[in-house]
Image (cartoon, rainbow, N blue to C red):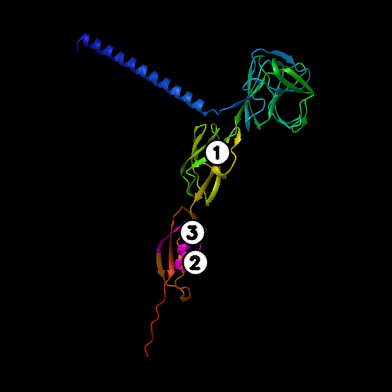
Amino acid sequence: MSATGRRDVRKSSKRRGRRAGRIGFLALAVAAAWALVAAVAAQATTVTVGSVMPPTFTSSPFEGVRTQFNTTLPETGANLASPVNGAIVRWKVAGAVGGPFTLRVLHPNGAGAFTATASSQAVTPNGSGIETFSTQLPIRSGDLIAIDSSNATDQIGVATVAGAGYGIFSAPPFEGATNAPAISKSGAEIELSAEVQPAPAIVGVSPDHGSVNGGEKVTITGTNLNGASSVMFGETPAASFTIVNEEKITAIVPQRLKTGNVDIVATTLAGESPTGRVDQYSYRGCTVPKLAGKQLGSAKVALRVAGCKLGKVSMVKGPAKKTGQVIHQSRPAGKVLAPGATITIKLVKQTKVVAKQG
């Protein structure tokens, strides 16, 4: 090959290498993008409860070891109380100085007092800006959030907002204790909010029945299903399951040793899905009946009612008093098999009577 030819080959090889590099980089970028999409899709939707976190606030002292909580939030879209049952997965505070601080859940009793139902681990902010902390606190629809201080010198951000208000307990309450605010403030709100992950709910299962042998792929529809950590068929976990999105899970039905209905329950950080008729899965099968002593017609009926099928019928010798009766069945009574399983039986044949000649 001439020198010019060799130079052309080297140039062509370099161009192919550059193209391959660009294609490889593009493939990696696409894969990374899809991974990001998948990660975002796997996150459960949350609802914000508490302050809208106004950007202008003043860090104000608690003036004691106290509990503070917003009692009125006039801003559009603000949720003073949780609109759903679920779990607090993150909470935010701004203007907090000192600490450690504890997030608290309060349940109103309808008469101006509040019952302390749950509290988080104590945390210490790194600065007076917006700080976010992870937690896992159960919360019910209608519950409020509050914050406990540890020292009289602790501070929290307070924003001036017309129509807002917050209350103060003179001391943090014990779990289960019910208290009314000792002090009420108007025209201001504390910079405290939380993200609530709603509890999952199942509204449909398709198909809603199958064999006791399991292995069926079913589609479970509902709400707030992202982040599901388990899917149970009665007391048995699904053989496997895949979270498709917030409203759909596909699952492989596990085997069960008896027929009947079970509730499907999905569990997330926010709790378990409530049970009802819409989440039920029906296991169907052949529960082998006791056939011994039955005539052929009765045996057929018993098998049909039990979800089984009659297989081969053989005639065998046996006691004359049991002529025409089932004397043997291929599967024992009580055994649970797949729907339509075949059961073979043996009947006692009639003994021929030989007439004596006189």
Q: Secondary structure at mark 1?
A: strand
Q: Return the mark for residue 292.
A: 2
Mark 3 Cα shell of 10 Å, populated few (<14), some (14-19), many (≥20)? few
| Residue for badge 1 | 202
In the figure, 108 relative to 101: above or below? below
Residue appearing at x 43%, y 64% in the figure: 345
Which picture quadrant has residue 186? top right
Q: Quadrant of the N terminus?
A: top left
Which span of residues is magenta-colored?
A: 287-312
Residue appearing at x 45%, y 73% in the figure: 323
Residue type marked 1:
Ile
Report, in whole angstroms, how far the alpha carbon at label 3 lies from the one at label 2: 16 Å
**Side of 76 relative to 214 (left or right):** right
Residue type marked 2:
Ala
Q: Secondary structure at mark 3?
A: helix
Chain-order first, disc 2 or disc 1: 1
Q: Which residue is situated farthest in the bottom direction here?
A: 358
Q: Which residue is situated farthest in the left direction here?
A: 1
Mark 2 Cα shell of 10 Å, populated few (<14), some (14-19), many (≥20)? some
